[in-house]
Amino acid sequence: VIMSMRYTTELGSVVVDTKVIAQMAGLSAVELYGIVGMAMVSLKDGIVKMLSRSALTKGVNVIVEENELCIDFHIIIEYGVNIRAVTENLISTVKYKLETFSGMKVKRINVFVEGVRVDE
């Protein structure tokens, strides 16, 4: 498992940490209709916690495999939305943005819906 993305130019090397890619992916996700936030699941007790905007990367896992990106999202959605439509929109939007941003191909995006929030 590679923890950064690397490429070389004629003037030197560029290294991008996967945390930067995770932040870009998380910000792209929470901008979408139907997604109210990213989630973190406590392995100890199984409790789902909605993350603040400053901690979005904890709800996104990025792995670089053979120069391609694999991303896992843990999201909380808004009550009443079509889960399939929201997750398909998430996958296509993030794939486009990350491929444009990083120049790398997105191999796989997994989405885990961890909770639903009812707006009052």
Image: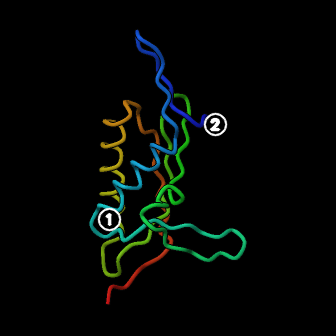
Check if mark 2's residue and mark 1's residue have beta carbons within 8 Å: no
Q: Percent x, y for residue 42? A: 65, 70
What residue is at 37 percent from the left and 85 percent from the top? 118
Position of residue 29 relative to residue 99, above or below, is: below
**Res. 94 mark:** none
Amino acid type of the residue tagged 1 in the rendering: Val
Q: Quadrant of residue 29?
A: bottom left
Task: Give the image's coloring scheme.
Answer: rainbow
**Residue picked out by circle 1:** 86
Q: Amino acid under label 2?
A: Val
Expressed as whole percent of the image width and height from the top left, the position of residue 80 reads 31, 81
Nearest to the eye among marks 2 and 1: give it.
2
Q: Is residue 44 above or below residue 70?
A: below
Residue at (50% x, 55% y) in the render: 57
Q: Does residue 5 appear to the left or right of 120 in the view shown?
A: right
Instruction: Describe the element under mark 2 as helix, strand or loop.
Output: loop
Give the residue pinned by disc 2.
1
Image-based side of 57 in relation to 43, left or right: left
Helix or strand or loop: what does disc 1 sit on?
helix
